[in-house]
Amino acid sequence: MRVSNERDSVLHSWCVPSTWQAPTVVGGRGAHLELADGRRVLDMSSLAECSNLGHQHPAVVQAIREQAEQLCFVTAAWGAEPRKALAEALLEKSGFEGGRVFFTLAGADANENAVKFARLARGLPRGRIVARDRSYHGASYAGMALSGDARTSDQVDAEAFGVIRVPAPYAYRCPFGSTDDDSCGRLAADAVGEAIDRAGADTVAAVLMEPNAGTNGIVAPDSYWPALRAATRERGVHLIADEVMSGFGRCGEWFAWQRHGEAGRPDLMTLAKGLTGAHLPLGAVVLSAEVYARLADHMLYTGLTYCGHPLACAAGLAAVRAYEDEQLIERSRRLGATMFAELKAMQALHPVIGDVRGGHGLFAVVELVVDRASRAPLAPWPQSSATLGALLREAMDEGVSLAARGNLLILAPPLVIEETALADALALIDRLLGKHFPTHA
């Protein structure tokens, strides 16, 4: 009898289908995954940086169970208690009093709808959108157009979609030639303002940016986001914060822009991933009261059959309560600072570490280089090196799942990770870096 493999029936994303192979997950508890072969693996990436609450969080599972017994589904043409309650919770946590929430299925369609709402509110049905190089906003066609992602750029004409691209606030390799983080952040924000001015502010509907965490591995300097907000507000252009990855404690706040206070408040923000802790698919667009007022009396030609699905919203509401009751936002901030300090200590020991970024919460990026002085990458972006691949495989063999992209190690463990497990994983990374990238005299 032939033993089947999931590869024989499922088409998987972000891979060469014929080469896909992965162990089967049969369960999970906290920060660990349980595999079909009996192994228990520590998840140091929250899978796709989305399982912020860990796996099988009991309060979220219970909320899904109770909602399923009461009401599984009604369309958005009808009201649903969990949808209302979750929207109110999101408006309260974001401080968007008088605003509204539009629910989607994931981050990509949240970004698409945020752009649609911004264009409608500006009275520009085909208004231009300023987005940045080396960004990610989804893999739908509109999502690819909005993203500055080298992997998908040849699949869509971003210019035809109305996207204007600007350089990223990548201080380690500053596109403006600055060697100072603060200056690079301000120059990157200035570039957005200049792009709006060249196009004409009356033609630009919105600027769409990630405030912090993203798989692109760029963490903007502290100077960037407030300066960006000032540049867009001065020109009357909406600012959309893509908080799909950075929200719900990942960067030490409910939403990453809140680190800058009112000086960083966007006009709209998009959510997904941590919104339910990945227990069920759900995305959202949160609109300020000002944006809502501009479209309140317009027909909204948008919708998804499952938007605001009661089961997903019940999971989202339970997730919000778990973040709050277990003080996970504060915990992420505290453990993130510890993790960042440990990684910086590793940088002093391992010349292969060119830069360490993040640390505002349980999110950090370790950029690996061939030579620290020249900052030459291990492989051209977005390619990865065979040596880094070997390190990831050995970590998995030792029961720790690490995420990498290109030359970057991306650390984003669940906010519920035990402190001893985090310390052990960091010690393993330290040891494997020394083994696979030995220091040469």
Image: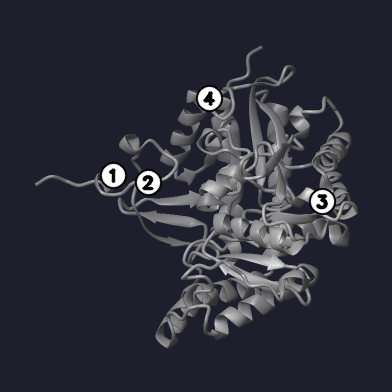
| In this rendering, position of residue 235 left or right of residue 68 | right
Residue drawn 64% across and 59% down? 116
**Cα–Cα gap, marks 3 and 4:** 54 Å
What residue did someone put label 1 on?
A: 7
Q: Amino acid at mark 4?
A: His
Which residue is disc 2 drawn over?
Answer: 12
What element does badge 3 sit on?
helix
The image's colour scheme reads one colour
Q: Is residue 3 above or below residue 382?
A: below
Front tag of 4 and 1? 1
Tell me how far mark 4 sits from mark 2, CA to CA: 30 Å
For marks 3 and 4, give the one nearer the viewer: 3
Q: Is residue 263 visible?
A: yes
Numbered label attached to residue 202: 3
Badge number at residue 436: 4
Q: Are marks 2 and 1 in contact (CB under 8 Å)?
A: yes
For this rendering, which residue is in front, 319 or 237?
Answer: 237
Residue lying at 52% horizontally and 25% vertically, measured from the top left: 385
Quarter location, residue 393: top left
Amino acid of disc 3: Asp
The foreground one among 386 and 262 is: 262
For label 3, count other residues whose C-alpha is less than 10 Å away and answer few (under 14), some (14-19) or many (20+): some
| Residue 34 pos. (x, y %) | 39, 56
Q: Earlier in the sequence, mark 3 or mark 1?
A: 1
Give the percent coordinates (x, y) of residue 344. Answer: 73, 37
Which residue is located at x 57 percent, y 33 percent? 150
